[in-house]
Image (cartoon, rainbow, N blue to C red):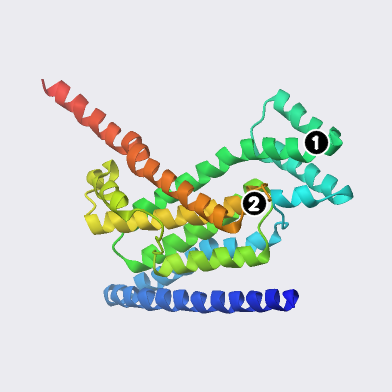
């Protein structure tokens, strides 16, 4: 009975994924044709080049990351606690090799992580703690940069085609990048759920329940980047919403893979992901843009002002 229920849920997930994918594709084609027609009125070559560019972005930024992720092995740190014998040893070795390949470790740290394989009963606990501590900064860097790019692109862009392509490409690429850094991916069902989230936010860029938008809107519209680029309130808020949904999706992906606490429920992980996403977004809007945009502008004009005196 349980297997039948799981199969039924999996079928509905696939149907939902395909349905939303068709909606996104139809919306993208409709908007692309509108722009292509306008370019064609100027010159047919411009219209052809536009369609070629769209095709390249879709294949390279959406199709490739979506398909490529399925070649990674399915795993999560939670499963390591339940593994034993050869399976446990196999995954411990994979985690060690992945750390050596993808994370900058000192010689002492390299020897330390290799030594975990000799601890037998304590190998998984020691290795999981070390793996999460070293992998998390690399993941957070990728997530932060992607969310920041999405905020800028969708806040500045006033065209739905660019927004849809940018959102879909950035999010699918981010999921793939997270799995590359970790060395493994979530289950097929979890991947499809993540893809449904990506496609949904590509269309709607919404779903902000459980979050305080009254705090987010002024941060988005009054932030250093918004003022520097002259972004209007609606566009800045839309960019912040898109960045937040990306951060939520990335946090969920990371927690799927790195959560080793078998006692945590799915609801607890979901709340943890939301809190983490909102915290990073506030950092992007408050600190990150202040350092990277407003301060250089101040320095530039400050120097000019000094020279005039």
- Is 75 on the left or on the right of 275, as rendered? right
Residue 156 visible (yes or no)? no
The residue to which callout 2 is attached is 257
In percent of width and height, residue 23 lies at: 45, 78
Q: Quadrant of the N terminus?
A: bottom right
Determine contact: label 1, label 2, CB under 8 Å.
no
Look at 62% across and 63% down and name the residue there.
Answer: 190
Badge 2: few (under 14), some or many (20 or more) residues near its Cα, within 10 Å?
Answer: many
Task: Give 134 or 255, whichever is nearer the viewer.
Answer: 255
- Is 130 on the left or on the right of 195, as rendered? right
Q: Quadrant of the C terminus?
A: top left
- Is 79 on the left or on the right of 221, as rendered? right
The residue to which callout 1 is attached is 122
Q: Nearer the viewer, mark 1 or mark 2?
A: 1
Asked which quadrant contains residue 245, the reply is bottom left
Look at 64% across and 40% down and name the residue there.
Answer: 132
Cα–Cα gap, marks 1 and 2: 20 Å
Image position of 309 with respect to 93: above or below: above
In percent of width and height, residue 90 lies at: 83, 47
Image position of 141 with respect to 267: above or below: above
Look at 29% across and 56% down and name the residue there.
Answer: 237
Image position of 23 with respect to 117: above or below: below
Q: Reading the chain from its start, which is encountered first: label 1 or label 2? A: 1
């Amino acid at each position: 009975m349980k297997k039948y229920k799981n199969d039924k849920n999996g079928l509905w997930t696939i149907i939902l994924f395909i349905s939303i994918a068709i909606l996104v594709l139809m919306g993208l084609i409709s908007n692309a044709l509108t722009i292509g027609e306008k370019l064609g009125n100027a010159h047919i070559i411009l219209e052809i080049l536009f369609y070629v560019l769209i095709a390249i972005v879709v294949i390279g930024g959406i199709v490739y990351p979506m398909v490529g992720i399925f070649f990674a092995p399915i795993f999560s740190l939670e499963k390591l606690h339940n593994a034993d014998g050869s399976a446990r040893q196999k995954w411990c070795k994979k985690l060690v090799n992945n750390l050596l390949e993808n994370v900058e470790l000192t010689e002492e740290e390299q020897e330390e992580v290799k030594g975990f394989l000799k601890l037998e009963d304590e190998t998984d606990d020691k290795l999981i703690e070390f793996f999460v501590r070293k992998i998390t900064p690399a993941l957070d860097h990728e997530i932060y940069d992607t969310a920041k790019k999405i905020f800028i692109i969708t806040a500045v862009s006033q065209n739905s085609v660019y927004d849809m392509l940018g959102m879909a490409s950035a999010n699918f690429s981010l999921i793939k990048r997270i799995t590359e850094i970790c060395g493994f991916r979530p289950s097929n069902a979890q991947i499809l759920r993540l893809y449904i989230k990506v496609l949904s936010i590509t269309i709607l860029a919404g779903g902000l329940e459980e979050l305080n938008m009254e705090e987010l809107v002024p941060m988005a519209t009054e932030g250093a980047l918004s003022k520097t680029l002259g972004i209007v309130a609606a566009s800045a808020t839309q960019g912040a919403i898109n960045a937040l949904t990306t951060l939520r999706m990335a946090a969920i992906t990371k927690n799927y893979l790195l959560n080793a606490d078998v006692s945590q429920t799915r609801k607890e992980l979901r709340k943890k992901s939301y809190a983490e996403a909102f915290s990073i977004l506030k950092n992007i809007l408050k600190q990150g843009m202040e350092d990277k945009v407003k301060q250089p502008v101040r320095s530039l004009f400050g120097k000019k002002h000094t020279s005039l005196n």
